[in-house]
Image: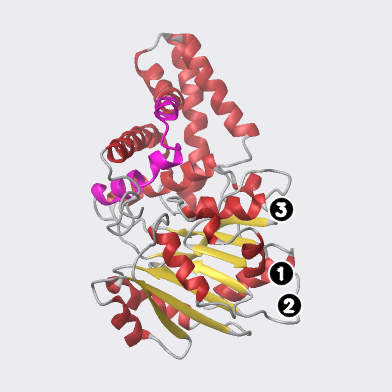
Amino acid sequence: MVIVTGVAALAWLYLLLAHGGFWRTSVLLPKASRQPQRWPAVVAVVPARDEADILAETLPTLLRQDYPGPYRVVLVDDASTDGTAEVALAVGTGRLDIVRSEGPPAGWAGKVAAMETGVRAATDGEYLLFTDADIAHPPDGVRSLVAAALGDDRALVSQMALLRTETVWERLIVPAFVYFFSLLYPFARVNDRRSRLGAAAGGCMLVRQEALEAAGGLAAIKDALIDDVAFGRLLKDAGNRTWLGLTTSITSRRPYPRLADLWNMVARSAYTQLRTSPLLLVGCVLGLALIFVVPPLAVIIGPTDVRLLGLLAWAVMAGMYVPMLRFYRLPWLLAPVLPVVAVLYTAMTVDSARRHWMGRGGAWKGRTAKTCQ
C-alpha cells in the first residue's frame, strides 16, 4: 500500500506544481488598457428550448446592455412547447428578434443546431455572443467582453458563469464541478497560444464571426455533444488567440435543488468527455480512485508510514481546493470532503456510460444523441 499511496502523493505534488496552476481562481477577464475607437456590431445568440420559466429573469439582462455599438439579441425558440417565444415577446424590446427552429437536421446535435439557426439570423454581427437562456449578465458585460477581445486580438473570449450554490447539494457538488473542469482544461494552458489545449464555457462565448467562419463554422462541430469544449478547440486549432476564465458577475440562475438534478447535469456528457471509450472509462475510474480515494483511505487504515504519505496527499488535495471554495464564498471546511465528492462524480461518470449503452446518452432538453441523428 505504501507504493500506491506514494504514487498518489507524487501525483498531487505534480498537480500542484506543474499542471498549469489549474487550482488558481485568479484567471479573470483582462481589463482593457484603453477603449476601442470603434465598437463593432454584436449579436447575442440564445438557444432556448422550453425555457419559459427562466427567461423572464435572464433575458432582460441581455436586452439592457450598456453597449456603445450596434447590438441586438437573437433568441432561437428550438421547438419549445411551454410558450418560450411568448414569454420572450412579453419581455422583449426592439433589440430582440425571435427565430423558430423545428429541431436539428440529421447529423446535428440539438444545441449546436439551435446555435447555427441563430448564426444564420445574425449576419450583421461582427462578433457573436453565444449564451444560454439561464445566464444573467451585468449591464457592462458585453462592453467588457468586446474590450478584452479587441485589446489583445482574441478571436474568442469565454467566461465560466458563476453557478448557484444555494442548496446543500449545490454547495457540495458545484464548486467541485468547476474544479474538475479546470483540472481537465487548465485555464492558463487554454489561454497560452503555444499550447494546443482549447476549451470554452458555453454560458458565455464571444467570438469574432470572421474567425468562426474561417475555422469552418458550427458545421465543423455539428455533432458535438460537449459543444463548448469543441467550440474552443475549433477556434484554437485554427490558430486563433483564445481566452477562458472565471467570473462572479455573469451568473447562472438555473437551480439544481436535488442531487438528481446535479447528477443528470454531469451524467449527460461525462462519458462523451471520455470519447465513449470503455478503456478510458476504466482508466478514469482507476485514476480518480488513486488520486482522491487512496490518500484518505491510507490515513484511516494504513500503517504509520503510509498514513503520513496519505495525510500529505490529502492535505495538498484539500489545500488546492480551498481557493475554489473561497471563490464561491463557501467554508474551507468543505475542502477535506473532496474525496467524497470525487466518489460521487465517479458514480455519475459510470452512470453516464450506462446511459450511453442504453441509447440515452448526451440528452439536451429532452433530446438524446440518438434522436438527433
Neighbourhood count class around disc 3 (C-alpha, 10 Å): few under 14, some 14–19, many 20 upward: some
Neighbourhood count class around disc 1 (C-alpha, 10 Å): few under 14, some 14–19, many 20 upward: some
Classified by dominant secondary structure, the portion drawn in magenta counts as: helix
Q: Quadrant of residue 241 in the image?
A: bottom right
Taking depth in this image into account, of 196 and 4 the one nearest to the observer is 196
Taking depth in this image into account, of 185 and 121 the one nearest to the observer is 121
User: In the image, is residue 280 part of the stretch drawn in magenta?
Assistant: yes
Instruction: Write down the residue under mark 2.
Output: 36
Q: Residue furthest front?
A: 106
| Place of residue 286 in the rendered image (x, y in percent of width and height, measured from the top left) | 42, 23
Q: Disc 1 on helix, strand or loop?
A: helix
* Residue occupying the point 29% across, 83% down: 86
Find the magenta span and give its range. 259-285
Kindly identify the amino acid type of the residue bearing the numbered disc 1: Leu
- Mark 2 vs 1, N-terminal side: 2
Kindly identify the amino acid type of the residue bearing the numbered disc 3: Gly
| Place of residue 165 in the rendered image (x, y in percent of width and height, measured from the top left) | 36, 55
Q: Disc 2 on helix, strand or loop?
A: loop
